[in-house]
Image (cartoon, rainbow, N blue to C red):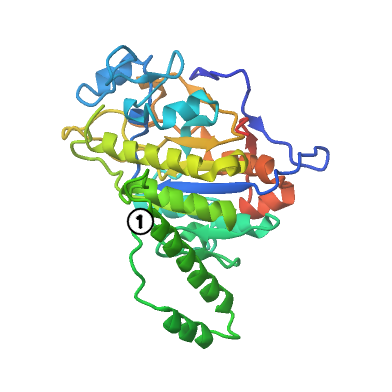
């Protein structure tokens, strides 16, 4: 039998959500942002199993060195795990402040290893068996049960996770240029939808665009005096933070470019650059929120992990279990959370990947129960046929 252990004394157990147990009311203005890394990032380069000799045997060219004086070595988190060194000035301080928990061996039980199918599986949040509703995402269902929910997708199109009965505004913020539609044209378009079911969504879309354009003008004026960079995820994350601080409390954004079959790199290289940009963006998001960070939770997910062993092209291939990031001012962080196993050949899934021990729907249901004060009936609407698990994230 595989020996399982917890690095923290808190056990991961089913969460009681019946009438016999009451949860504290969620904090006023509580916010939740889901960051989806599309392409399946290599979690073994983010959260490095530094105590595993098997890791270093399996990745002779791309492994991150054990913690040490070298700047390219992993940043020690505890006796078993380290963090990628490119996150030294962005994510590592958040972890040290106790505002970041990392959940290894996380994901879905979908084993297709197909990017698109598994992304859809996660975004729908429905049981694997049986018929699926491709117009009902779990984030939309969450918005349907959270009191005062104001959802927003920071994407060019409404993602599957945000599709459903609740109207969801959307706008891509990564690259925002001068609008091709002026104020007069906006009024004409809005008048076309007057009295229509889509009228409120059209009006809100133009309002969001105007706010973002105003923010961008402020950034341009600040050029040369601590100006916000217009490159990378950092600028986008700051815009998201401003909108979530003032207007929205349930958000979604996706970041692509994580499919590293060839020349993935180690402490430096393609993946390191991507992780660095992501880390800077998340740190900027936290900074921009200011006091609102205390009531905000960010969860970073990906469709699956990657093969534990490197391939012949100095990269990694499609895997199974991955590592989720959970950040926020009220997160019980500074630790590795959830159920875990020793990282060795005997504990790999199908002798190639991390297993999934922390099923994502159960983990998120436990988080939503705590953060939003949801009861059993409400959680059942978000994730049907799931027993929530409280792994002490908030």
Task: Choose between 330 and 145: the one closer to the eye.
Answer: 330
Residue 170 shown left or right of residue 46 in the figure? right
| Placement of the C terminus among the 4 image quadrants | top right
Say above or below: 10 vs 300.
above
The residue sitting at 36% across, 17% down in the picture is 50
Residue 126 shown left or right of residue 268 in the figure? right
The residue that disc 1 covers is 220
The residue sitting at 64% across, 58% down in the picture is 149
**Residue 346: percent from left, percent from top:** 39, 20
Say above or below: 279 vs 150.
above
The residue sitting at 36% across, 47% down in the picture is 227
- Residue 8, by quadrant, is top right
Residue 345 visible here: yes
**Residue 96: percent from left, percent from top:** 49, 23
Task: Choose between 1 and 185: the one closer to the eye.
Answer: 185
Residue 131 visible here: no
């Amino acid at each position: 039998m595989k020996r399982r252990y917890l690095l923290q004394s808190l056990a991961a157990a089913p969460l009681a959500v019946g009438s016999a147990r009451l949860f504290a009311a969620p904090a006023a203005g509580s916010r939740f942002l889901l960051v989806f890394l599309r392409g399946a990032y290599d979690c073994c380069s983010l959260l490095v199993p530094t105590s595993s000799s098997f890791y270093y045997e399996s990745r002779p060219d791309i492994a991150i060195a054990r913690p040490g004086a070298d700047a390219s070595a992993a940043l020690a988190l505890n006796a078993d795990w380290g963090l990628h060194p490119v996150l030294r000035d962005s994510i590592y301080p958040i972890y040290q402040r106790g505002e970041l928990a990392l959940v290894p061996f996380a994901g879905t039980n979908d084993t297709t290893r197909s990017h698109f199918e598994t992304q859809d599986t996660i975004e729908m949040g429905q049981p694997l068996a049986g018929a699926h509703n491709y117009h009902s995402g779990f984030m939309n269902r969450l918005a349907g049960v959270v009191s005062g929910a104001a959802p927003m997708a920071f994407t060019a199109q409404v993602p599957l996770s945000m599709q459903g009965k609740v109207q969801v505004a959307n706008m891509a913020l990564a690259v925002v240029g001068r609008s091709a539609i002026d104020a007069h044209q906006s009024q004409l378009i809005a008048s076309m939808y007057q009295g229509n079911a889509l009228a409120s969504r059209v009006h809100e879309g133009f309002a969001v665009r105007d706010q973002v354009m105003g923010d961008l003008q402020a950034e341009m004026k600040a050029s040369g005096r601590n100006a916000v960079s217009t490159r990378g995820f950092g600028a986008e994350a700051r815009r998201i933070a401003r909108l979530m601080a003032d207007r929205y409390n349930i958000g979604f954004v996706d970041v692509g470019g994580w499919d590293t079959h060839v020349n993935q790199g180690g402490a430096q290289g393609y993946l390191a650059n991507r992780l660095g940009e992501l880390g800077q963006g998340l740190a900027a998001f936290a900074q921009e929120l200011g006091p609102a960070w205390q009531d905000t939770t960010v969860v970073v997910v990906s469709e699956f992990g990657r093969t534990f062993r490197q391939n012949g092209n100095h990269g990694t291939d499609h895997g199974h279990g991955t590592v989720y990031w959970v950040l926020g001012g009220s997160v019980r962080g500074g630790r590795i959370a959830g159920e875990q196993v020793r990282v060795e050949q005997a504990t790999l899934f199908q002798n190639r990947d991390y297993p999934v021990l922390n099923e994502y729907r159960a983990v998120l249901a436990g988080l939503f129960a705590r953060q939003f004060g949801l009861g059993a009936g409400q959680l059942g609407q978000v994730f049907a046929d799931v027993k929530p698990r409280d792994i002490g994230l908030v």
